[in-house]
Amino acid sequence: MDRRQHRRAGRTVAAVGILIGLGTWVTGCAGSGAAAEDVKGGGDPVAALHRAADALRDAGTSKAGTSMEMATGGTRVTIRGKGVYDYRRRLGRLTVVLPEDPTGASGHRPITELLAPGALYMKNRGAGVPADKWVRVETSTLSDGNLVTGGATDPYTAAEVLRGTREAVLVGRTVLAGTPVRHYRGTADLSRAARYAAAGDRAALAAAAKGFATASVPFDAYLDDQGRLRKLRQRFSFVNGRHKATVAVASTLLLYDFGIPVDVPLPAPADIYAGRIAEDGGEGDGA
């Protein structure tokens, strides 16, 4: 697939985007309710959050669980994913499960997503794409930088967003899946995150800073005693181009089993779809 075809795939974000086509999302964020405590042992909250991506890279690999929440027609729906991630090579693999459609049909095949520096690969996407082919999208061409389009936020990119933290507080200490963690709450700025992110994420985060309704990203982050992210909930806001309405999306990330073996081979060029993607984003015959 040549560069012209890559750009064409990027421009079809309305067709290949999983999340945006489902409708608009309206929900609140529930805090832990824990009383603020002394920062003893945790250091400056903003500095700790700025280092979160580096701590993941030091950890090497992990398993990941994702969820993305929105509502359509007043009904809340959740897209869930599960997989693995290599933070040093910046490669991940997720299996993403779509919710039932408004008619109650649940015939969607799980979508396999490969996350790579500057690119998102999707298989079993539908929209007229053959079942044995991958769709490749350059994340820098997406107005959200692939923070929401794929229905799952890239774990390392999510951590890179925290480099843009301007203000944060330590809510308190708690235990998450048996691991002691510190719960931080704050707001990150996507423009600032883009300036300090690794080279592979700068263009995508800069695109998100321009494409979202606001560059401010409220979050709740849970870091273990090694500074590694264990849970991260971020709220994004963008304008739905079709309906001109502001859409709020909540993305939640869970990371666990650090240090496991992870191998994420990328598709061969011959396996990448170069044809037209259906504009309605519906399921194609091959899916």
Image (tube, grey):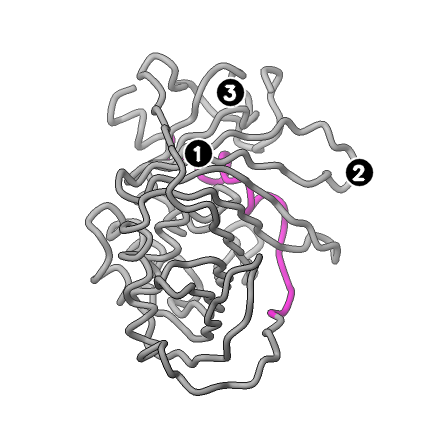
Q: What's the residue at 29%, 65% (across, down)?
A: 163
Q: Check residue 5 in the rendering and tell me which mark sits there, or answer none.
A: none
Mark 2 surroundings within 10 Å by alpha-carbon count, few (fewer than 14), some (14 through 19), many (20 or more): few
- Quarter of the rendering containing residue 82: top right
Give the residue type that dot 3 points to.
Val
Mark with earlier residue (1, 3): 1
Mark 3 surroundings within 10 Å by alpha-carbon count, few (fewer than 14), some (14 through 19), many (20 or more): many
Separation of residues labelled 2 and 3 (CA atoms): 23 Å
For the record, the magenta segment spans 9-29
- Is the Cβ of the residue at disc 2 closer than 8 Å to that at disc 3? no
SS assignment at label 2: loop
Q: Nearer the viewer's eye, disc 1 or disc 3?
A: 1
Q: Check residue 93 in the rendering and tell me which mark sits there, or answer none.
A: 1
Of 281 and 98, the residue lying toward us: 98
Q: What's the residue at 31%, 44% (across, down)?
A: 60
Q: Position of residue 78 (x, y in %)?
A: 65, 49
Give the residue type that dot 1 points to.
Arg
Q: Position of residue 13 (x, y in %)?
A: 44, 39
Mark 1 surroundings within 10 Å by alpha-carbon count, few (fewer than 14), some (14 through 19), many (20 or more): many
Mark with earlier residue (2, 3): 2
Give the residue type that dot 2 points to.
Thr
52 with respect to 223 (left or right): left
Q: What's the residue at 45%, 49% (across, down)?
A: 153
Q: Nearer the viewer's eye, disc 2 or disc 1?
A: 1
SS assignment at label 3: loop
Magenta-drawn stretch contains 233 = no
279 with respect to 121 (left or right): right
Residue receiving disc 2: 103
Whether residue 234 can be seen here: yes
Q: Looking at the figure, which quarter contains the C terminus?
A: top right
Q: Is residue 45 above or below residue 246?
A: below
